[in-house]
Image: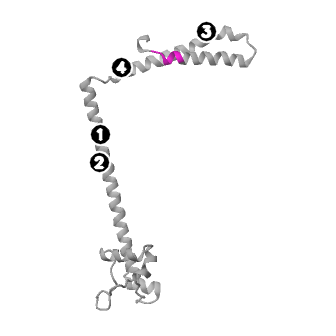
Amino acid sequence: MSTTSELNMEIFGTQQVPLLSSRQLAPFLRRSHTTVAKLQQQGILHYACDENGMPIAGRYDLLEAVGDFCNYLDIQIQKKSETTDLDAQKLRELRAKADIAEMKAAEMLKDYHAAKDIERLVNAHVAACKKRMLRILAEFTEQIVDMSDVCAVESVLTDAVYAALDDMRKWRPDEA
């Protein structure tokens, strides 16, 4: 990685670049000059230094300041990402605890059904639906075989399907 003076030489053609005030630096960082001052007070931005390494109050080296500000933003993004990950983990743990508590409560109340019982009921309902739908053919074939009006046939079959669906809505497991 190049030093600031090497970058200054490459970009500006000199090792020394004009030092900027907070008002001059602010547009480069897309912040106000008061924000630039606050960032300096917080130790995020650093004043430029003279040849003896002493800070020059109120003056910033453009490349140093932009680099410092980018580092600051990277750290903020990383903190936000860590917080978001932590919040998501806490939420998953909370949901898991709630699910476990719900299952324990249901078990204490005996308010649950075994999977095999549910599977048996669903299969019985599907079989009853299939049987009822197939019965439509047997019930209405004679009625529609001599019909020449397609709309009339459609109407008879639509009514039959809706009646079958209504029967299935009213279906009870004891009918299996």
- Residue 135: quarter of image: top right
Span colored in magenta: 166-171
Residue lying at 62% horizontally and 17% vertically, measured from the top left: 159
Q: Amino acid at mark 4?
A: Asp
CA separation in Å, label 2 and label 1: 10 Å
Q: Residue furthest right?
A: 148
| Magenta: main secondary structure | helix
Front position among marks 2 and 4 = 2
Answer left or right for 156 relative to 58. right
Q: For mark 2, what is the residue?
A: 90
170 drawn magenta:
yes
* Nearest to N terminus: mark 4 or mark 1: 1
* Nearest to N terminus: mark 2 or mark 1: 2
Element type at marker 3? helix
Element type at marker 2? helix
- Residue 38: quarter of image: bottom left
Q: Which mark is on residue 139? A: 3
Front position among marks 4 and 1 = 1
Q: Amino acid at mark 3?
A: Glu
Q: For mark 4, what is the residue?
A: 117
Where 13 sits versus 79, above or below?
A: below
Q: Amino acid at mark 1?
A: Ala
Element type at marker 4? helix
Residue toward you, 67 or 167: 167
* Nearest to N terminus: mark 3 or mark 2: 2
Residue lying at 35% horizontally and 64% vertically, measured from the top left: 76
CA separation in Å, label 3 and label 2: 59 Å
Q: Position of residue 128 (x, y in %)?
A: 49, 15
Residue lying at 28% horizontally and 32% vertically, measured from the top left: 102
Residue lying at 55% horizontally and 16% vertically, measured from the top left: 164
Q: For mark 1, what is the residue?
A: 96
Residue toward you, 133 or 1: 133
